[in-house]
Amino acid sequence: MTDADLTAQALSDPDNLPLTEEELARLASARRVRSVRARTGLSQQRFADTYRINIARLRDLEQGRTRADSALLAYLAVIEGEPEAVLRALG
């Protein structure tokens, strides 16, 4: 089966349509947010409280309902790399 055949078959199945670029981006963002939080060992609520992220936004991000913007992705990178520095800065 060729790539074109696979694509045509996927597009013909209304219950299993290929993901859009936006959907793929949201899923990648969700995976990144969950990964950083998991490395801290904190629950969603505790992570949100500790790092001052709105809990509803965190849940939406982790569920792939919204996508993290560049500022939040940068913040997550700092949390991941230097969590103690973030905690000191937040006082």
Image (spheres, grey):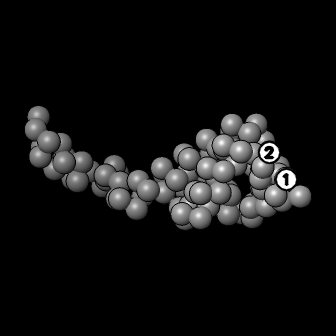
What's the amino acid at mark 2? Glu
Q: Can residue 61 be seen at all in this image of the molecule?
A: no
Estimate how packed mark 2 is, as few (under 14), some (14 to 19) or many (20 or more) residues with alpha carbons within 10 Å. Answer: few
| Label 1 element class | helix
Q: Which mark is residue 39?
A: none
Q: Is residue 56 left or right of residue 28?
A: right
Q: Is residue 35 left or right of residue 17?
A: right
Instruction: Looking at the picture, tell me which residue is in the foreground, 43 or 16.
Output: 43
Q: Which mark is residue 88?
A: 1
Residue 3 to residue 47: above or below: above
* Quadrant of image for the N terminus: top left
- Residue 3 lies in quadrant: top left
Q: Position of residue 83 (x, y in %)?
A: 75, 45
* Quadrant of image for the C terminus: bottom right
Give the residue drawn at x 35%, y 54%. 19
| Label 2 element class | helix
Q: Is residue 76 left or right of residue 86?
A: left
What's the amino acid at mark 1? Arg
- Residue 42 lies in quadrant: top right
Circles 2, 1 touching at the beta carbon (< 8 Å): yes
Q: CA distance from mark 2 to mark 1?
A: 6 Å
Q: Position of residue 82 (x, y in %)?
A: 71, 45
Q: Which mark is residue 84?
A: 2
Estimate how packed mark 1 is, as few (under 14), some (14 to 19) or many (20 or more) residues with alpha carbons within 10 Å. Answer: few
Give the residue drawn at x 69%, y 37%. 39
Q: Can residue 52 be seen at all in this image of the molecule?
A: yes
Instruction: Looking at the picture, tell me which residue is in the foreground, 26 or 75.
Output: 75
Instruction: Looking at the picture, tell me which residue is in the foreground, 29 or 4.
Output: 29
Q: Position of residue 10 (x, y in %)?
A: 24, 48
